[in-house]
């Protein structure tokens, strides 16, 4: 678990253009990371739901408890029952 992932020293970056894509990593670097990827893990206490918006709401309820108490008090103590949590009315 305590392994530090550093890119290989024989890779190079090439400045392609300004902005979000300022650096393009060479294919060798991508292959190095791909070999170490463990893939997604499933957590029974934090299921990923089918609806992206519901996942975002679930995340925000958990990370912003004060705001959730004011605006979503009815949802705070509910457990996900199905892929449609919270239930639609």
Image: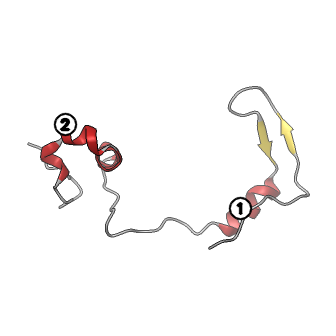
Instruction: Return the residue at label 2.
Output: 70
In this orientation, which residue lies closer to the viewer: 47 or 51? 47
Label 1 crowding class (10 Å Cα cut-off): few <14, some 14-19, many 20+? Answer: few
Number of labels in the image equals 2
**Image position of 15 with respect to 42: above or below:** above
- The residue to which callout 1 is attached is 33
Q: Position of residue 20 (x, y in %)?
A: 68, 32
Q: Give me the residue at 70% from left, 68% from top.
A: 35
Residue 24 vs 49, above or below: the answer is above
Quadrant including the C terminus: top left
As measured in the structure, the alpha-carbon distance from the residue carrying label 2 to the one carrying label 1 is 43 Å
Q: Nearer the viewer, residue 64 or 55?
A: 64
Task: Name the residue rendered at 81%, 32% in the picture.
Answer: 16
Helix, strand or loop at label 1? It is helix
Mark 2 surroundings within 10 Å by alpha-carbon count, few (fewer than 14), some (14 through 19), many (20 or more): few
Drawn side of residue 50 relative to residue 69, left or right: right
Render colour scheme: secondary structure
């Amino acid at each position: 678990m305590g392994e530090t992932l550093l890119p290989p020293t024989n890779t190079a970056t090439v400045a392609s253009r300004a902005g979000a894509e300022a650096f393009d990593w060479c294919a060798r670097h991508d292959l190095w990371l791909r070999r170490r990827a463990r893939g997604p893990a499933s957590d029974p206490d934090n299921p990923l739901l089918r609806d992206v918006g519901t996942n975002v709401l679930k995340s925000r309820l958990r990370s912003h408890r004060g705001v959730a108490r004011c605006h979503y008090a009815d949802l705070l103590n509910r457990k996900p029952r199905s892929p449609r949590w919270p239930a639609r009315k």
